[in-house]
Image: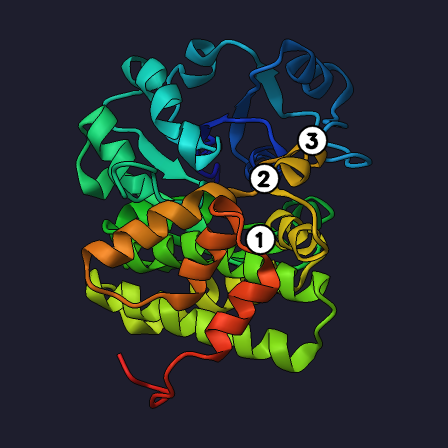
Amino acid sequence: MTGTAVTPTPAIRAAVLGAGSWGTAFAKVLSDAGCEVTLWARRPEVAEAVSARHENSDYLPGIALPSTLRATGDAEKALHEAELVVLAVPSQQLRANLEGWAGWIGPDATLVSLAKGIELGTTLRMSEVIREVTGVSADRVAVVTGPNLAMEIAREQPAATVVACTDPDRAALLQRACATRYLRPYTNTDVVGCELGGAVKNVIALACGMIEGMGFGDNTKASLITRGLAETTRLGLALGADPMTFAGLAGLGDLVATCTSKLSRNRTAGERLGRGETLDEVIAATRQTAEGVKSCRSVLDLARAHGVDMPLTEQVVRVCHENVPPAVALAELMRREPRPEHDR
């Protein structure tokens, strides 16, 4: 008796646009999960290194990338027939890049944001920027967020992440596309809460770095992390997010990782500010983008537009953009009027 042949399921085609540390690490994840992945790199030499030598030494030194991962400097080629379009450029550069790419995106592709920030000037979340530029419906836009430090993921250290989309079926598709033996994705339909958790934690991580740079200990850092989570939750509730999101991977999980890890660009930038360096000196010494430096202003604008009190965020803005010394900002926080812990 002859059995019926089983047709194998075609691999999901994915384009990852942005070959920085997290874009490259996530392209590796998708490849390891069995997707057919093309990584777009702005610099031709990076694309060549990924395709020919299976490495991106500029952003993930020492990491061997899958031989199946392809790279190109041609965005149109990367996007050809892509079912997943993963946007891995810094938040303040997303709009300009996406305006050039939008015409090459397929009519039913799922657009995935890896960026964590709020756009300056518009106070839009990244999913809102994507929808505004491309005209796609909300159910075609997903975000990936959580405690996902790129180098640890690239080294295949066990971690979890959140895949958020208002369409549960698309969320489940993306979940399958990035599930590996070292990365466990969970789904969530609360896109608003997941994006806010990712954006605000960068601001709080700057403050935590300042505390570290000023020489304070764990009580100070734990207090700051906890009150930072309270700020994030207040903003989320004002924008209709599920409060449970902030107790999960996209909230507390991402906040703790970013505030405590030496791999965190935002924490590192804050630490240098806490030691007395100017913002210009910090930016000059940092190769990669610390999203919170720019997004702190747009987060504060968003909070003020909705009548939400965010004192930590306000002081980070003052240090980063108004030349206020971190010691002065901390003193002002400590002098605030006493209030109940759960006062909204």
- Identified by mark 3, the residue type is Pro
Residue at 34% from the left image edge and 70% from the top image edge:
233
Q: Amino acid at mark 2?
A: Trp
Question: What residue appears at the point 34 percent right and 34 percent down from the top-left corner?
Answer: 111
Give me the C-alpha separation between circle 3 and circle 2.
15 Å
**Alpha carbons under labels 1 and 3: distance apart:** 19 Å
Q: Which numbered disc, 1 or 3, marks the residue that appears first in the sequence?
A: 3
State how far apart marks 1 and 2 are (Cα). Answer: 8 Å
| Label annotation for residue 148 | 1
Sooner in the amino-acid sequence: mark 1 or mark 2 = 2
- Relative to 128, is 132 above or below? above
As helix, strand or loop, the secondary structure at mark 1 comes to loop
Q: Where residue 205 sits in the image (x, y, percent)?
A: 56, 59
Amino acid type of the residue tagged 1 in the rendering: Asn
Residue depicted at x 56% and y 16%: 42
| Image disc number at residue 22 | 2
Q: Is residue 189 visible?
A: no
Q: Which mark is nearer the camera, 3 or 2?
A: 2
Percent position (x, y) of residue 296? 43, 50
Taking the image as shown, residue 32 lies to the left or right of residue 117, namely: right
Q: Is residue 112 visible?
A: yes
**Category of crowding for the residue at label 1, using alpha-carbon neighbours closer than 10 angstroms: few (below 14), some (14–19), many (at least 20):** many
In the picture of the structure, the residue carrying the numbered disc 3 is: 66
Disc 1 and disc 2 in contact, CB within 8 angstroms:
yes
Asked if the residues shown at circle 3 and circle 2 are in contact, with their CB atoms under 8 angstroms apart, the answer is no
In the image, residue 97 above or below residue 216 = above
Q: Residues within 10 Å of mark 2 (few under 14, many from 20)?
A: many
